[in-house]
Image: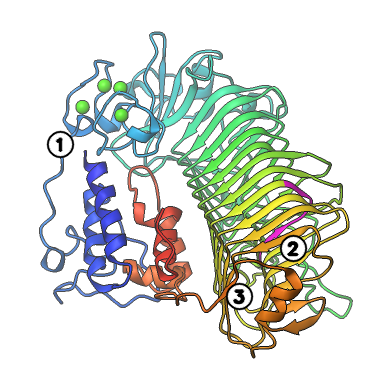
Amino acid sequence: MAMRIALTLVLVSSLVGCGDDSPAEDDVTDDVETDGGRDRDGGSGDGGTPASCGDLMCEGAETCSSCEADCGECPEPVITECNDGIDNDGDGLVDWQMDVGCWSEADATEAAGPRGDENGFTTFDLDADSQLVYVSNEGDDANDGLTPETAVATPQRGAELVRDGFPDFLLFRRGDSWRGMTLGDGRVARRFKSGRDAEHRLVVGSYGDSTERPRFEVDTHFFDDDGNGRSFLAFVGLAFVSYPKIPGDPDFDGASGGAIRVVGAESRDILLEDNYVEYGEFVLQNATDLEVRHNVVWRSYHVGTCAYNADGSPNLNGSSEFRPSGIFAGGVDGLVIEGNVWDENGYNPDVAEACATIYNHDLYLSGNDRLVVRDNLILRASSIGLKMAANSTGASQDILIENNLFAEGEIGLGMGGNDDSEYRFVDARVLHNVFTDIGRVPPTMRNLSWFLGLQDNDGTEVRGNLLVNQREDANGFGIHLASGSMRNVTLVDNVIEGIDRRAIWIEPEGSWDGIRVTGNRVVSATDTACLITHEGDFGAVTYADGAYASGAAADERFCVDGARMSFDDWVSASGETGASESPEASPDPGRNLDGYASHLGIGSTIGDFAAAARQQSRHAYRPELTAPNANNWIRAGYGVAPR
Ligand SMILES: [Ca+2]
Ligand SMILES: [Ca+2]
Ligand SMILES: [Ca+2]
Ligand SMILES: [Ca+2]
């Protein structure tokens, strides 16, 4: 039950914290302890106030275990099935260290349960004929691998011992590491095997007393179906670090590496959960029903991405020769991407010739159907946080993008790209996302600050999003609709505040039909803002119920076909019904991840927040570092209800 207690506390503290930062910090620190996060460094960054034990303030990385004097005595650990020393479910596996039905020591059940009962994580039961194969740094490939005491030594030997078509478990000892090894020696062996069916997967996971993920230092993908059908797999709780991209590594080349690659058209039902990827990426193409959940992907990059003009000056577009992103997914039918941390993908500021480019992104998703992108932290992308492409009519259908947090990069969400066929994106919902500081520090150094752009959409609802914090004088916009085709697109109940330029920018073409812009609150304090920029005929666009406030002169607040105009002239030009001026002021505008890092006591910058979020794992899970909770804190600054 510890998990539920922790979640409740966080919810309470984030509500309490809405208008009053100071008292919530202690609560958050307590939550971390309750949630089993002892002995973590807390990810405190350079920008925070130095914490000193003994000053009677529990702050920064201090916890009850590191500083009892300030933080008080640690609560007694809650006894659960997963830490009571008993094999409660009779499967021969005891507690979180060994039982694959435990997501951590805080799990109340050794049996697997629905994710909603397992803190959002996937747990497993053994099947009658499941076989477990153990791999550790103290193992020996001459062993049978069937017990921890008789573990084998290498991933390739372990991969041989689990059986194709069976619900077997290949378990690596946590805290151990392997270098230059994958699931097979060579391309064919790395294609690995399949499980039995979607309910009986072949699981590649972990075991042991450590909470540190088994670490694979790889120079290629750890698993790669290589175009062959591989199905019913789960890769859970593993760390993949591309060692030739580790700055200072003796084998550094800045080029080789990987993580997981699934490209077989016959591949299906593959889960990637709670993995940590440094310098590598996920590549998913053509397959069916893939899930990418609760992973951390940081600094996928490749040297050779810088470009130069003839005079030797930098070409800010960068080179298209290498295209690293945090994930590339193309042509997948059924793709869920939820609860992940994507940070600084497409470049590496610490490596020469690894420039950010316009071609590289945190997520690059092209032509996927039944797509869900939910609850992700999408931070500091080379160019676009979430680039969505579709290269023919109807190429991407049934799309849900919900409650993600987009911060920095130069473009937040771009649904368009690379083609001008009509109606490429069909039945999309973009709901309750938060976008902040897009383009504040564009890694490419271009002057863009584009928050949310849609092209060639057919049947799209953009509802309840919050777009805030744009630096002045950028080439910027909030929400932009422009393309040859657009029909049945609704922008409703969005809050757009502090967007310096075209907060809502609509450029209708003759074929457009059924565009509704309704109930949005648009506020900008600057004198250069255009709350709505409309360029073209009004026939296809219905405006209603907008609430507007502007720092611009009274006759310069809206822009129609290049001319600035007053609220009254806007209403008369657009025919907007129910529009109003001077909505209620936001209680604490300007909230962003810098402020949230301060609020949590983990630093003062987006980088501090990101560093802490990259430490997330199921064994050390901090709900306050997730997109939904960060979003709620930012929302409160703008008077937007929590979700
Ligand atoms: Ca137990
Ligand atoms: Ca058990
Ligand atoms: Ca369980
Ligand atoms: Ca069990």
Do the residues bearing badges 1 and 2 touch, measured as CB atoms within 8 Å? Answer: no
Q: Earlier in the sequence, mark 1 or mark 2?
A: 1
The one nearer the camera, 241 or 8, is 8
Q: Classify 10 Å Cα crowding around label 1: few (below 14), some (14-19), many (20 and above).
A: some
Residue 448 seen in this snapshot: no
* In the foreground, 456 or 551: 551
The location of residue 79, given as percent across then percent down, is: 15, 36
Dot 3: what SS?
A: loop
| Disc 2: CA contacts within 10 A as few (<14), some (14-19) or many (>=20) | many
Label 3 near ligand 3 (CB < 8 Å): no
Q: Residue at x 15, y 41 (%)?
A: 78
Q: Is residue 10 visible?
A: yes
Find numbered disc 2 in the image and state the secondary structure of the residue it sits on. loop
Report the quarter where the N terminus lies.
top left
Nearest to viewer (mark 2 / mark 3): 3
**Part of the protein shown in magenta:** 446-458
Q: Is the residue indicated by label 2 positioned so its CB lies within 8 Å of ligand 3?
A: no
Ligand 4, seen in the image, is in the quarter at: top left
From the image, tell me which residue sits under label 1.
79
- 536 in the magenta segment: no
Q: Quadrant of residue 533?
A: bottom right
> Looking at the image, is mark 3 or mark 1 nearer the viewer?
3
Classified by dominant secondary structure, the portion drawn in magenta counts as: strand
